Amino acid sequence: EDKVVQSPLSLVVHEGDTVTLNCSYEVTNFRSLLWYKQEKKAPTFLFMLTSSGIEKKSGRLSSILDKKELFSILNITATQTGDSAVYLCAVEWGGSNYKLTFGKGTLLTVNP
Amino acid sequence: GAGVSQTPSNKVTEKGKYVELRCDPISGHTALYWYRQSLGQGPEFLIYFQGTGAADDSGLPNDRFFAVRPEGSVSTLKIQRTERGDSAVYLCASSMHPNTEAFFGQGTRLTVV
């Protein structure tokens, strides 16, 4: 079964709207959760979260992790057309191997 | 280099042929990862190198897939006897150390016809 589940799978909004993207996970030995933005081929790094309840912020983007309820959210305020992309959530977990398990992503479309 | 570089950016090959995909990580990054991304899916882990050695190759789908990193920098992913199901974008990422954020290259789009 999928260990990292993102919702919604796709979302269409108008410029200026605020969006919240969700990522839930079910893994053993959780270490960190990462958010990436993928516009064409290369995912670009947004945030790395390791501690519960501490918000990370970069411009109009912010993210927070809840390790008790096993989820994270990514918020984007005042959306712009340039925010249109697939947003990927990934979890690092397990033993000593540093591999990421990704969700399927959320396709965000921001219309003018 | 400034970022992770992958070549070629696109590769079309015939079924049954051998292909090599190259990854140049960010200078000084010791950890290197290969992922494969099919349409509509998130990237799936293939193999992880720490230095020259493959620390985890559990994601390689079968023995047609092999990867090397002989000098601890550039890595090559090799696919033998390609099949149409191998068509995907192959992404390489590197990080300064394990457990720090990984930076991805632009990927190689492999199409097997």
Image: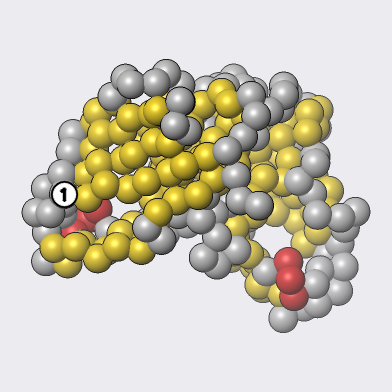
Q: Nearer the viewer, residue B51 or A4?
A: A4
Q: Horizontal and vertical percent for residue A91?
A: 54, 35
Q: Residues within 10 Å of mark 1 (few under 14, many from 20)?
A: some
Q: Quadrant of residue B113?
A: bottom right
Q: Nearer the viewer, residue A53 or B10?
A: A53
Left/right placement of residue B39 relative to residue B32 reads left
Residue at left offset 77%, top offset 62%: B19
Which amino acid type is shown beneath numbered disc 1?
A: Thr
Q: Is residue B13 visible?
A: no
Q: Is residue A1 above or below residue A77?
A: below
Residue at left offset 56%, top offset 23%: A31
Chain ID for label 1?
A
Looking at the image, which residue sits at the far front? Answer: A69
Under circle 1, the secondary element is: loop
Q: Quadrant of residue B11?
A: bottom right
Q: Horizontal and vertical percent for residue B41?
A: 55, 60
Left/right placement of residue B47 relative to residue B26 reads right
Q: Is residue B97 visible?
A: yes
Looking at the image, which residue sits at the far bottom? Answer: B113
Residue at left offset 58%, top offset 31%: A92
Left/right placement of residue A28 relative to residue A107 reads right
Left/right placement of residue A45 relative to residue B71 reads left
Q: Which residue is mark 1?
A: A18
Q: Is residue B70 above or below residue B86?
A: above
- Colour mapping used in the image: secondary structure
Q: Horizontal and vertical percent for residue B4?
A: 53, 40
Residue at left offset 45%, top offset 25%: A68
Q: Is residue A43 above or below residue A31?
A: below
